[in-house]
Image (tube, helix red, strand yellow):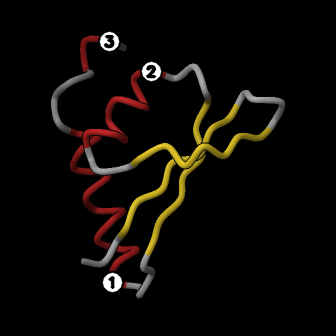
Amino acid sequence: AHSVWRHGVGRRLMESALDALHGAGYGQGILWTLADYEQGRTIYEATGWRSSGQIRDSGRQIAFRRALIG
């Protein structure tokens, strides 16, 4: 599975999702991910998402937010 990482597919999927959310009129996005999912954190931060400090599921999940308009 690791041989297919880092080819830009995740970034293109993220751009498509952000375009769809923006087109639907949303001003801000929030996503939840596993706290120990380092690969996910890397792509989220690289595409403009920032940790919101929110946690759930006894700290196993963390939230990221980002502006969609602007």
Q: Is residue 46 left or right of residue 50?
A: left
Nearer the N terminus, badge 3 or badge 1? 3
Identify which residue is drawn at 28% across, 62% down.
16
Alpha-carbon neighbours of circle 1 within 10 Å: few (<14), some, or many (≥20)?
few
Identify which residue is drawn at 25% across, 20% down.
4
Nearer the N terminus, badge 2 or badge 3? 3
What is the C-alpha distance between the residues marked 1 and 2? 29 Å
Alpha-carbon neighbours of circle 3 within 10 Å: few (<14), some, or many (≥20)?
few
Q: Nearer the viewer, residue 53 or 22?
A: 53
Q: Name the residue type under label 3.
A: His
What is the C-alpha distance between the residues marked 3 and 1? 33 Å
> Which image quarter is the N terminus in?
top left
Which residue in the protein does label 2 denote? 38
Q: Nearer the viewer, mark 3 or mark 1?
A: 1
What is the C-alpha distance between the residues marked 2 and 3? 14 Å
> Could you say where residue 34 lies in the image, as x and y percent from the top left?
61, 30
Where is 52 relative to 10, above or below? below
> Could you say where residue 42 lies in the image, as x and y percent from the top left?
34, 29
> Could you say where residue 18 lies in the image, as x and y percent from the top left?
33, 65
Nearer the N terminus, badge 1 or badge 2? 1
What label does residue 2 carry, if any? Answer: 3
Q: Name the residue type under label 1.
A: Gly
Rendering quarter of residue 40? top left
Q: Nearer the viewer, residue 58 or 10?
A: 58
Which residue in the protein does label 1 denote? 23
> Which image quarter is the C terminus in?
bottom left
Q: Nearer the viewer, mark 1 or mark 2?
A: 2
Q: Quick one: SS at disc 2?
A: helix
Q: Quick one: SS at disc 1?
A: helix
Identify which residue is drawn at 26% across, 22% down.
5
Where is 13 relative to 55, above or below? below
Q: Quick one: SS at disc 3?
A: helix
